[in-house]
């Protein structure tokens, strides 16, 4: 496994991290034993960065991670979690939402204490605000609260996860020193982060965590136009209508671009997002031991060539509409 510097910190984190949304909720049935084995396998293969969130099953993924950490006492594994906005409410937040209503100090502190309890730790390495609104940029009180929690020794560093439909909404937070890391959607289809987020991260030594590198499984290359998702799998909505068919068609075009240069589509997708210098780690979901093996293998593989990376830029697909309707 290759390791990379995490922003301004002295951390060296694995280029392939462990994403845990699917082991907590929203991806259909998931066996707890498989989840536990998957995390263990990823760590065995050199992964030392695990990302989770309170919203992943109301702490379910945190509790599974906590049980793994208990068994691996003494190993340095960097933990990142996220605090959701107070619910019920829109996600991403409405432009009419007030930050004090969705991210009050009481709510932030309450969620942080739950994460500490479920992970079984006294201090969380990275605590992130799980979503954001451009409307809140002039009132970043949630980060003032997290800085206070940092001084109290409950968290080490602070981050933000971008809203899906407006990722550059976090640019002011990055420029003004409110965050140590930013978690972004970046993949062969969605290259928006290249325009503003990546340059700001480079200029300010802000760590970049990449999520959705496989476009919710599409860029793993196993979906077809006939794929049916199980009950409770969020991809029923993500690929609603004719989205799946259109996506599969575009994936086939990507295969043609890659040709014989890379043997595996999923590995190519991960290598693509690891090309930017500012990227610290990518966190593909790991649901079983086999996925851990496949993902972590990319962490020690030869990087994608500059020539192929530039060719794949042509597959950038503008689809901001994806989250709001067909």
Image: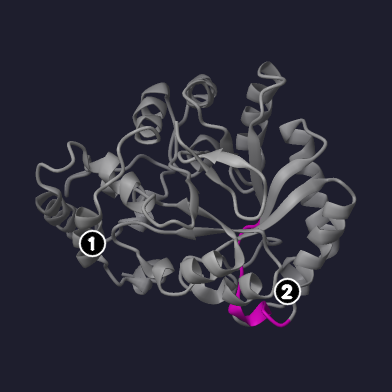
**Disc on res. 14:** none
In this view, the residue farthest toward the right is 152
Task: State the image coordinates of residue 7 (x, y, percent, origin top left).
Answer: 60, 54
Q: CA distance from mark 1 to mark 2?
A: 39 Å
Q: Is residue 31 above or below residue 276?
A: above
**Residue pictured at 14% horizontal, 43% vertical:** 261
Q: Give the quarter of the image for residue 98.
A: bottom right
Residue at x 44%, y 34% (from the top left corner): 286
Q: Secondary structure at mark 2?
A: helix
Alpha-carbon neighbours of circle 2 within 10 Å: few (<14), some, or many (≥20)?
A: many
Q: Residue 229 appears at what percent x and percent y?
A: 32, 43
> Which numbered disc flags the more N-terminal residue, 1 or 2?
2
**Label 1: which secondary element:** helix
Which residues, given as a range, are shown in magenta? Answer: 129-138
Q: Residue at x 20, y 54 (%)?
A: 308
Depth order, front residue of 107/303: 303
Assign the magenta stretch its main secondary structure: loop
Q: On residue 99, which mark appears?
A: 2
Q: Is residue 210 magenta?
A: no
Residue 257 visible somewhere in the drawing: yes
Few, some or many C-alpha atoms within 10 Å of disc 1 (few <14, some 14-19, many ≥20)?
few
The residue that disc 1 covers is 310
Vertical arrangement, residue 151 with respect to residue 117, above or below: below
Q: Quadrant of the rendered structure where residue 109 is? A: bottom right
């Amino acid at each position: 496994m290759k390791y990379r510097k995490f922003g301004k910190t002295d951390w060296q984190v694995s280029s392939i991290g462990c994403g845990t949304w699917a082991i907590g909720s929203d991806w259909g049935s998931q066996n707890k034993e498989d989840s536990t084995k998957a995390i263990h396998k990823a760590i065995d293969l050199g992964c030392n960065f695990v990302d989770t969130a309170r919203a992943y099953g109301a702490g379910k993924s945190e509790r599974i991670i906590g049980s793994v950490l208990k068994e691996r006492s003494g190993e340095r594994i960097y933990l990142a979690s996220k605090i959701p906005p107070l619910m019920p409410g829109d996600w991403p937040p409405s432009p009419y939402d007030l930050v004090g209503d969705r991210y009050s100090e009481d709510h932030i502190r309450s969620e942080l204490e739950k994460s500490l309890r479920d992970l079984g730790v006294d201090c969380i390495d990275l605590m992130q605000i799980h979503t954001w609104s451009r409307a809140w940029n002039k009132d970043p009180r949630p980060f003032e609260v997290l800085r206070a929690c940092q001084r109290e020794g409950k968290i080490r560093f602070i981050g933000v996860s971008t809203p899906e439909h407006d990722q550059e909404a976090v640019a002011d937070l990055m420029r003004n020193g409110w965050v140590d890391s930013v978690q972004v959607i970046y993949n062969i289809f969605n290259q928006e982060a290249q325009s503003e987020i990546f340059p700001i991260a480079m200029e300010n030594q802000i760590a970049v965590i990449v999520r959705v590198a496989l476009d919710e499984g599409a860029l793993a290359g196993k979906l077809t136009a006939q794929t049916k998702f199980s009950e409770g799998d969020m991809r029923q909505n993500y690929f609603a209508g004719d989205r799946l068919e259109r996506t599969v068609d575009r994936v086939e075009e990507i295969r043609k671009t890659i040709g014989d240069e890379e043997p595996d589509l999923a590995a190519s997708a991960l290598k693509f997002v690891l090309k930017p210098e500012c990227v610290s780690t990518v966190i593909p979901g790991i649901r079983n031991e086999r996925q851990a093996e496949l993902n972590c293998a990319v962490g020690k593989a030869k990087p994608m060539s500059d020539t192929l990376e530039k060719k794949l830029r042509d597959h950038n697909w503008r689809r901001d509409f994806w989250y709001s309707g067909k």
